[in-house]
Amino acid sequence: MSEILLSDPRAERTLDAAEVASELDALARRYRDAGGFGIQILNLLGGSADGLIDRLPRPVQSGLEGATRQALRLAMFGANGSRRMVPDQPAGINRAVSAAMGAAGGMGGLPGALVELPATTAFLLRSIQGVAADEGFDATADSVKFDCIQVFSAAGPLAADDGADLGFLSLRLGLTGAAVQKLIAQVAPRLSVVLGQKLAAQTVPVLGAVAGATTNFVYSGYYQEMARVHFGLRRLAVAADQPHEDLLEGLRDRLLDPA
């Protein structure tokens, strides 16, 4: 990926094998630890990840994938526009803002949460773009925007994931409008499960605002960590002068066999 900034000191020399192995180990730890807090939060809210979506009305369940596709399309415009007006913020601030948005959506119950869904999706995408920039990539480049959507294909923080499927699409499509739509169509089913869990948590009686704030806080942190893994791997491929697919396989092996 040629959009990495040449001013990034990590791109000034080729890393040796030991340095590559160390970075892969660190990325594997980051990936493995990203969703741990989400399970604890879910236990506090009660229920299981699978049972959460069953709380939603049938019409909402059936329309969730389409709503997620639309939210991703809107997020593409909203996230890019906001980065031109407001500078990227540290991860902690992003999580706090996301929590405030979740609280506002949760106060209105399911209707409020549905209204909040596209705004939260745009904010998450904006946070992912900020991580891409921090890792040395030009977040305005089409290929980087493409990769930012790919990050959403990672399993959500409430999913049991042994690393066998990193969720990062290995097929790079041509950077056309049709390709972006195809990518969104591939990502939407998986993200719809994640957002469905979030919506259901926000319908918890009395605790809707708390649940909305908490799940948004967890999900914002999770996707920022997944972005660190994704773009860290892209950056490592440049710094090590190795194919991305080879490094991805190395990361997958570490997740399947932590020893």
Image (cartoon, grey):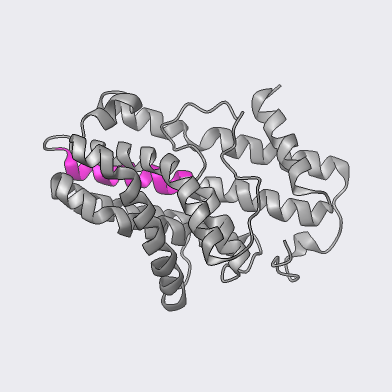
Magenta segment main secondary structure: helix
Q: Residues in magenta?
A: 207-222
Quadrant of the frame with the C terminus = top right
The residue at 76%/70% (across/down) is: 6
Residue 120 in magenta? no
68 left or right of 164 in image: left
The residue at 76%/40% (across/down) is: 22
Q: What is the residue that sits farthest to the bottom in this orientation?
A: 85
> How many numbered circles does the render carry?
0
Residue 212 in magenta? yes
Quadrant of the frame with the N terminus = bottom right
Closer to us: 225 or 249: 249
The residue at 78%/41% (across/down) is: 246
Q: Where is residue 72 in the image (x, y as percent from the top left)?
A: 40, 56
Image quadrant where residue 98 sits? bottom left
The residue at 54%/45% (across/down) is: 226
Query: Can residue 161 be seen at all in this image of the molecule?
Result: yes
34 left or right of 102 in image: right
Image quadrant where residue 92 sits? bottom left
Q: In the rendered view, would you say 61 is above or below 161?
A: below
Query: Can residue 202 be seen at all in this image of the molecule?
Result: no
Q: Position of residue 224 (x, y in %)?
A: 50, 50
Q: In the rendered view, would you say 172 is above or below 82?
A: above
